[in-house]
Amino acid sequence: MTRHHWLRSRHLADRARLRDGLDLPPVLAVVDAHRGLRGPYSAAGALMRAIAVDAFIRRPELAARHNIEVATVAPELAGAVPPAWATLEWTVADEERTRFYSRLHTLNIANGLAEFLKVYLDELGGPRTLVVENVHEADPTDHEFVAVLLRRTDLPNLVVVVGTGTDPVVDPRGELAISLSEVLAEHARATQATAVRPPAAEPADVPALAKAYVDSDCTSDDPALRAAYDQVEPQFRAALHDARRVDLVATGEPSWALGAITHHAALGGDPMGAGADSLKRAMGHCRKVGLYHASAEIGMRGRALVDHTTHPELWWHFTEGASTSLASVSRADEAEAIYDDARAVSDDPKLHMNLAYGSAMLYARHFTEDRRDFHRARGWMNLAIALASQLPDPKERAFHTVFSRNGLALVEVRQGKVGQALRLLEDGMAKLDDELAEGEHALHRSVLRYNRAQVFAMTGRLEEALVDYQAVADLDPGFPEHHFHVGTVLRKLDRNTEALEAFRRVLPLSPPFPEVHYNLADCLLELGDLEGALAEFDYVVQLDPRHVEAHVNRSSLRCDLGSPHAWQNTETGLLLAPANPHLLSLKARLLAEQGDPTTARALLEEVTRTNPTFAPAWAILGQLRYETADLPGALSDLTQAVSLADTPETRYNRAIVFEQSGRYTDAATDYRHVLDNSDDEDTRTRLEHCLSHA
């Protein structure tokens, strides 16, 4: 039974009463997730502010290992950790930035915070309770954070109590990395709190109640406070918001600027000045650190606040920020609507250039598969290039022309026109070298080379890809993806020791993400460190329980090691991917080892029928037939396996069948093949035996 709790009621006070009656471990922290407080990571940031200083005293290494996570969720703690952002994009002006975090970055941050908590709770000793309230009003970042804490099985010392209203918890729009509504239903025990009628109210001091509502940053669920707020004069309300904003600014805590300060500034006495400025700064920060849902929401509020005719630059700033943020979280239809609206109200050529580029990206990469249209993408990108070529400033013209041609190269790659993509990228690199001074637009120059590396890797030109990836890694050593790609290419070149070093360089530069640990596991497996590989595959499954390949590989490895957990791992994988032929073959292998060869063989026959090109199933089936003395059947199955995937192990097994069938010449051929790939003494002895009888 789950140890976590989900308490539901319309009012916070009722949930608190219910919580007081639960048998819970000592409280680690009670945090409020309402995004009206500090915007994204209102809950996660509150937790870090409550425990980080003590955690750093107890385990100083946590500050360096989780500096990005801590500084992102609680900006006021940035000075307590090593600098979190030391990559090239942080050295350029906002208008030059062309590289942003993946939409999965916030999920990686959530997993990094879970690692932080795991170490800290182990240090405290014994279980603790984390209470997260008002989750129904949380930003998607806190949705992810809570969901990760609930679903991870390696946090035995943590009990999470989630407080929400009575309506269903609604996941954010767009493609989801993790669904809080699903995780809550699976991992938390839901309880409905009994509503308690409040005592009869005394005659109300309406101004005082209105002030209390504003001082709650308009997050209180007390209807009396909200009613009083609605009753007071607009001018009085504005003065309350201004006073609260001043108080929050005076705290010196920058996370307030991502939530409550923007709210109070927009509703205070200077919405077009202080209000718009606070929204602009908040949106800029959220975009930079990958908080795209919040960035989109803030940008939409900014668009509603300013007018394109009186504040065209500010209006465009919000328009561009909201639309690109929406596209980044797979809400491309909403981004397209903003682009269409912007085109209809402006005749600015540079604005239309940017809109054309943005629309091209929607059709080339952001729309769902059924709406992608490379022909339309090409048309929009050509318009962007044409408009860029008309810009009066030579350097600006060069940059935007090359930038748009880089976008066109993406379209070419998506359509398989690799040669044209390479020409566009290399022409762009040469043009920037010719027309810009050394050091100008360094980020975009590195992006062009990175994109060329991707095209090289895509087409099998691995040595050239490695040179380019290594060059951008040397230029921007703090950017983790560069080292990851270096490792990936080295892995393909079978340079596993170097690949391992490259993947390990990623770890201190980024919150944990599944693919780097999956690749680490692969390298360790190739290098013979089976236990190390198994630990990494286990960790991948903690980070991403839906990572099918990690399930497959750890189940296979545990089968090879004879682990008692092999059956459970395989069954867990099959719950996720019930038709996966590799997992089904492993299950059949385990059934045979447990003394049920009949069921195992029937399962393998079904796998080979539905997946006739899956070699491992034929190999295991052949081994089963051999063990039941069906030599002709074993030979047929193993020959089929060799024809599909000619591995030394399968050759060796077939050679034994050949040998026991008296076909010594055929057996010798297979044994020689095995010895071409290994120096196995048993194989050499068997080969000599077969040659003496041939």
Image (cartoon, helix red, strand yellow):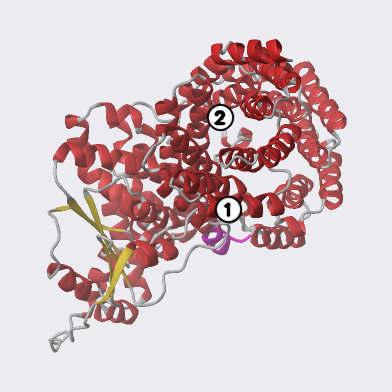
Percent of width and height locating residue 205 = 18, 80
Q: Which mark is residue 481?
A: 2
Percent of width and height locating residue 499 = 55, 19
Q: Residue at x 73, y 46 (%)?
A: 354
Count residues near mark 2 (Cα–Cα under 10 Å), then give few for <14, some for 14-19, many for 20+.
some
Q: Is residue 188 above or below residue 616?
A: below
Q: Which mark is residue 329?
A: 1
Prevailing SS of the magenta stretch: helix
Q: Is residue 462 above or below residue 326?
A: above
Disc on the earlier residue, 2 or 1: 1
Amino acid at circle 1:
Val
Percent of width and height locating residue 661 = 69, 29
Q: Quadrant of residue 62?
A: top left
SS at circle 2: helix
Q: Quadrant of residue 458?
A: top right
Residue at the bottom extreme of this rendering: 200
Q: Which mark is residue 201?
A: none
Name the one closer to the observer, 480 or 549: 549
Q: Is residue 432 above or below residue 75?
A: above
Magenta-drawn segment: 300-307
Does residue 341 show up? yes
Name the one closer to the observer, 621 or 678: 621
Q: Is residue 305 magenta?
A: yes
Q: Residue at x 33, y 27 (%)?
A: 64
Say whether residue 664 is left or right of residue 504: right
Q: Is residue 335 magenta?
A: no
Say whether residue 344 is left or right of residue 164: right
Q: Residue at x 21, y 30 (%)?
A: 59
User: What is the C-alpha distance between the residues marked 2 and 1?
Assistant: 19 Å
